[in-house]
Amino acid sequence: MSSGLAGIPLALEPLNRKEFVSDQEVRWCPGCGDYAVLAAFQGLMPELGIKRENTVIISGIGCSSRFPYYVDTYGMHSIHGRAPSIATGVAIARPDLAVWVMTGDGDALSIGGNHLIHALRRNVNITIMLFNNRIYGLTKGQFSPTSEAGKVTKSSPAGSVDHPFNPVTLALGAEASFVARTIDSDRKHLTSVLRAAIEHRGASLVEIYQNCPIFNDDAFAGLKEVDSPAVIPLVHGEPITFAGGQLGVVRGADGRLAVKPVSDVAASDLVVHDAQAKDATLAFELSQLTDTQDLSASPIGVFRDVARPVFDDEARNQVSMPADREAALQRLIAGPDTWTIV
């Protein structure tokens, strides 16, 4: 599998975290999960070894979309929901750039939903970090596409009647070639998932559960406990167990995935995670174990990581000049299409 970083120049000298810290004041609310994501990102970038000037961050509108200001690389704070489209243009025009997209649940899944799914289905070589705090933070606390039904906010005083989106299910339905989910407070897991995402060639979507302490505090508190029974860790090639190994995922008599006590089933009955399966059925089924209402269950990890044709690579191949340019021009001029002028 070709790396997502193939063709991107490496720095001549080792880089460090400070080189990816801009001179801009970080203006997020105290305790915002964005700080943890920013720190993980700035820690990962020097490890990748690519030049700062060959890194670009495109964002939309929202709290997370301030990200480009705080990283000392090239970037663009763009239009509401349109970051994937702008990033597509950058990726096609500049194969020597590592292209990141920073977006939120409102930016990506509401006004930007159409742009998101088409970037994923086309398999553009971009890495999308979707910050999901289940609320509109920048506009002061309205319910978002991922808010649970019944959510009482300024825009839903009687409780939202919307059914919440599952971003992972949406991405898999769009046939994304890399889909993952992680949590802002788990620095080690977050970093490993982001590394896998940027090294994947094609469109990568990483949903990040991110806390908003002002308008939706502790939305993911149950997922942050040690051996939380709500977290279903996904590790490629390993049986899916959780809650300290007490619970496991099996395939029931009806053919569907189910959660059972490990003590009640044979080891061979446990479902082994296969993120590299060409068929996305298992990944989709695992995404459906997510309780989008109360988050009493949520798989965390890489759901899918497969290779398929990359949009920008294919587009560039169509317009690239052949080695025998003069002969190609002659064939074009003397081609089979002729006109008779009378």
Image (cartoon, helix red, strand yellow):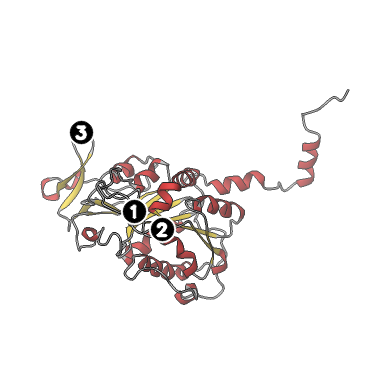
Q: Is residue 326 left or right of residue 251?
A: right
Location of residue 27 in the rendering, given as x and y in whole percent from the top left corner: 42, 70
Q: Earlier in the sequence, mark 3 or mark 1?
A: 1
Q: Residues within 10 Å of mark 2 (few under 14, many from 20)?
A: some
Secondary structure at badge 1 equals: loop
Secondary structure at badge 2 equals: helix
Q: Nearer the viewer, mark 3 or mark 1?
A: 1
**Camera-side residue: 286 or 64?**
64
Q: Are marks 2 and 1 in contact (CB under 8 Å)?
A: no
Q: Residues within 10 Å of mark 1 (few under 14, many from 20)?
A: many
Q: Residue furthest left?
A: 264
Picture quarter containing residue 259? top left
According to the picture, the residue beneath numbered tag 2 turns out to be 196
**Camera-side residue: 79 or 316?**
79
What residue is drawn where x is 30% and y is 43%?
162
Q: In this picture, is 9 found above or below 308?
A: below
Whole-angstrom CA distance, mark 2 to mark 3, is 34 Å
Residue 306 appearing in the image = no
According to the picture, the residue beneath numbered tag 1 turns out to be 142
Location of residue 199 in the rendering, given as x and y in whole percent from the top left corner: 46, 58
Q: Amino acid at mark 1?
A: Gln
According to the picture, the residue beneath numbered tag 3 turns out to be 254
